[in-house]
Amino acid sequence: MRKVLICDDNKSIRSMLSTCLELMDYEVLTAEDAYIALEIFKKHKIEIAFIDIKMPKMSGTQLLKKIRKEKYKTTVIIMTAFATVKNAVECTKMGAVGYIRKPFTPERIKKILKEIDKEVLKVEEKNNITKNSIHNTEKYLNNNEMEKAVKEIKYVLSEEFDNSEIYKMISKYYLKKGEEEKSNLFNRVSCELKKINDKDLE
């Protein structure tokens, strides 16, 4: 059973949302503030979290930052009665996949969960294809099948231009060709991208 966390200082919201999610066969955990939520994250594998953006002690935005810093792979849905474009953009940049305005109905919750499930499947499928393509690139380079390696490299770059692993493969490609200067250049690019991507998760 998938575990869902509801973090909201409003008891009525926690109760209504809990009932809705339990009827959908989710195991529901609740927190009245962000500090309690963080303790729950430490003890449980939370797949989905509904987080209120405006709470005492610590805001939902600050909680989201801490979740991402700890690298919890939780699907986060932000709830708010004070929706603004700035908040939506900020939360999206930090990895929130849903943003719903209060008051909301059970039907709205069901709809957003269905949409999220579809998007998660798409992302997982895309990530698997990219991983396979990078794996194939390395295999082709090891077998000196350079044309096939280039084809895989082009595919990954078209899908994920900032993927550090593919630049490592490009570095290996040029090393195989005896072009050490270009190999070193792309190796540095790979290292820098990895630093940037790791920093984004902080």
Image (tube, rainbow, N blue to C red):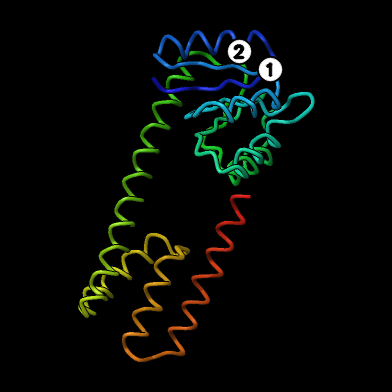
In the rendered image, the residue lying farthest to the right is: 57
Q: Name above or below for residue 138 compared with residue 129.
A: below
Residue 84 position within the rendered picture, expressed as x and y whole percent measured from the top left = 68, 35
Q: Residue at x 24, y 80 (%)?
A: 146
Quadrant housing residue 54: top right
Report the side of 176 relative to 35 (left or right): left
Question: In which quadrant is the N terminus drawn?
Answer: top left
Q: Name above or below for residue 145 compared with residue 8.
A: below
Evaluate if marks 1 and 2 touch, with contact meaning CB atoms under 8 Å apart: yes
Q: Residue at x 55, y 30 (%)?
A: 77
Q: Nearer the viewer, residue 194 or 159?
A: 194
Amino acid identity at mark 1:
Glu
Query: Mark 2 highlights which residue?
Result: 14
The CA span between labels 1 and 2 is 8 Å
Disc 2 is placed on an element classified as: helix
Residue 192 position within the rendered picture, expressed as x and y whole percent measured from the top left = 56, 69
Residue 25 position within the rendered picture, expressed as x and y whole percent measured from the top left = 39, 14
Amino acid identity at mark 2:
Arg
Quadrant housing residue 86: top right
Query: Mark 1 highlights which residue?
Result: 32
Report the side of 45 relative to 156 (left or right): right
Q: Residue at x 46, y 26 (%)?
A: 112
Report the side of 143 relative to 153 (left or right): left
Q: Name above or below for residue 177 compared with residue 8.
A: below
Q: Name above or below for residue 111 compared with residue 202.
A: above
Report the side of 197 relative to 111 (left or right): right
Quadrant housing residue 66: top right
In the rendered image, the residue lying farthest to the front is: 43
Judge the density around disc 1: few (<14), some (14-19), many (≥20) Cα neighbours within 10 Å: some
Q: Nearer the viewer, residue 186 or 84?
A: 186
Judge the density around disc 2: few (<14), some (14-19), many (≥20) Cα neighbours within 10 Å: many
Disc 1 is placed on an element classified as: loop
